[in-house]
């Protein structure tokens, strides 16, 4: 074999070896495990709206998850990820490799957030809870829910805006904006308020918002679901007379003090549209987000002649009902006596 042929074979051999070496190196860069979640099996990477690739890198570095930044960056650049960063909440698993991580982030295939509404009493506490789960700006969401001009197309105002929210578990993408959040809640509201429910409200002389207001009072009056239709019936009987609702929970709301156990003359002296001892009819808005149980209790109340009720002297979460004020006074004195006996102020 001539010297030239030997040289060419040697050169080809060297090139093949280099290709193998670089190929193996490239494969290792792409497929070697590169995510360490510090003892967890899985965790979530949150990429904010407007972030670019350097900020994604900074977040992975801050969390201490990325083991080899250079190999991750090399893989990301090969598929063009730095030019198409997508915000969202992404599920990372322990030992994830660069290929799977970059493919996940580039696809925008984020994991939804499950958000459950319960008995929030104020806009502030509600907004705070929502924005701990979503990227939505808390100041923007609070502004929307307290701005009469913004709420007018929804048929709401700052007092009754919380009636928009139907308690349930919902799925959102983490990067949902405040406006998108409200739009989705309006869709859920419309879905809940079926023709049948609206007709039931109409028969009572109420609309959806006033049902939510009354249901919020029923919700705060009793945790006993079986009693709620009875309590709803009492308040509806009072509204027909008309007669002040005289609902203690509305007084607590007026004071913004939900620790008050015993409503006294001092408490009911407060000047507030939410003080139903002084103001006839329903208060201007819900005093909490009521449960579906309480909403249904208002839509389908018990039929009776009771005008009064007070907590049972057994202090077991039930109530004693009365048709007359005299009988109510008897029940109330028993309850007050039991509070005194137990030293509850």
Image: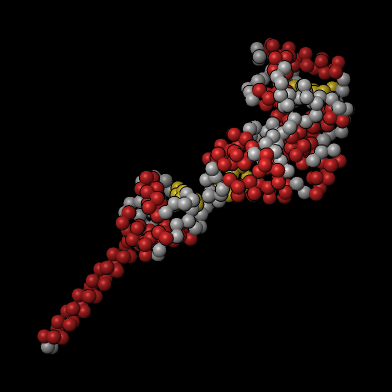
Name the image quarter holding residue 203. Answer: top right
Q: Position of residue 197 (x, y in %)?
A: 79, 45
- Position of residue 281 in the picture relative to residue 128 (left or right): right
Q: Quadrant of the C terminus?
A: top right
Quadrant into which the N terminus falls: bottom left
In the image shown, does 160 or 104 lie closer to the viewer? 160
Q: Quadrant of residue 292?
A: top right
| Residue at position x 32%, y 54% in the image | 69
The answer to whether residue 25 is visible is yes
Q: Residue furthest bottom?
A: 1
Taking the view exactly as shown, the residue that stands out farthest to the front is 149
Name which residue lies at 15% across and 86% down: 5
Left or right placement of residue 152 versus residue 79 in this view: right
Say how many tags the image has: 0
Scheme of image coloration: secondary structure
Camera-side residue of 311 and 140: 140
> Can you tell which quarter of the image residue 144 is in?
top right
345 is higher (above) or lower (below) than 3: above
* Residue 20 drawn at (x, y percent): 26, 71
Tell me what residue is drawn at x 23 percent, y 73 percent.
17
Residue 174 coordinates in the image, percent (x, y): 53, 49
Residue 310 visible in the shown view: no
Residue 164 appears at what percent x and percent y? 69, 42
Which residue is drawn at the image coordinates 20% and 75% (left, top)?
14
Q: Is residue 64 left or right of residue 236?
A: left
Q: Is residue 342 above or below residue 170?
A: above
């Amino acid at each position: 074999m001539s010297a030239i042929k030997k040289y060419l074979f040697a050169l080809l051999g060297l090139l093949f070896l280099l290709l193998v070496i670089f190929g193996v190196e490239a494969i290792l860069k792409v497929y070697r495990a590169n995510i360490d979640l510090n003892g967890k099996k899985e965790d979530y990477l949150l990429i904010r709206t407007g972030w670019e690739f350097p900020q994604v890198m900074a977040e992975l570095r801050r969390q201490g998850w990325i083991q080899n930044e250079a190999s991750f960056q090399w893989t990301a650049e090969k598929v063009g990820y730095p030019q198409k960063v997508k915000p969202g909440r992404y599920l990372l698993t322990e030992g994830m490799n660069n290929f799977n991580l970059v493919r996940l982030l580039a696809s925008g295939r984020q994991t939804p957030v499950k958000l459950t509404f319960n008995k929030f009493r104020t806009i502030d506490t509600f907004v705070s809870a929502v924005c701990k789960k979503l990227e939505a700006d808390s100041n923007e969401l609070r502004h929307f829910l307290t701005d009469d001009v913004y709420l007018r197309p929804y048929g709401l105002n700052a007092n009754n805006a919380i009636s928009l929210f139907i308690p349930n578990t919902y799925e959102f993408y983490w990067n949902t904006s405040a406006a998108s959040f409200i739009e989705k809640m309006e869709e859920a509201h419309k879905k809940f308020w079926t023709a049948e429910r609206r007709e039931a409200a109409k028969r009572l002389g109420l609309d959806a918002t006033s049902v939510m207001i009354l249901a919020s009072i029923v919700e705060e009056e009793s945790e006993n679901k079986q009693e709620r239709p009875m309590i709803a019936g009492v308040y509806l009987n009072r509204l027909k007379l008309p007669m002040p609702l005289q609902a203690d929970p509305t007084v607590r709301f007026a004071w913004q003090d939900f620790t008050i156990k015993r409503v006294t003359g001092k408490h009911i002296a407060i000047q507030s549209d939410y003080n139903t001892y002084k103001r006839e009819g329903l208060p201007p808005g819900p005093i909490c987000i009521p449960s579906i149980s309480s909403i249904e209790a208002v839509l389908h109340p018990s039929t009776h002649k009771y005008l009064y009720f007070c907590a049972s002297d057994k202090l077991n979460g039930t109530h004693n009902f009365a048709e007359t004020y005299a009988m109510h006074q008897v029940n109330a004195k028993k309850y007050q006596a039991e509070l005194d006996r137990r030293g509850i102020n």
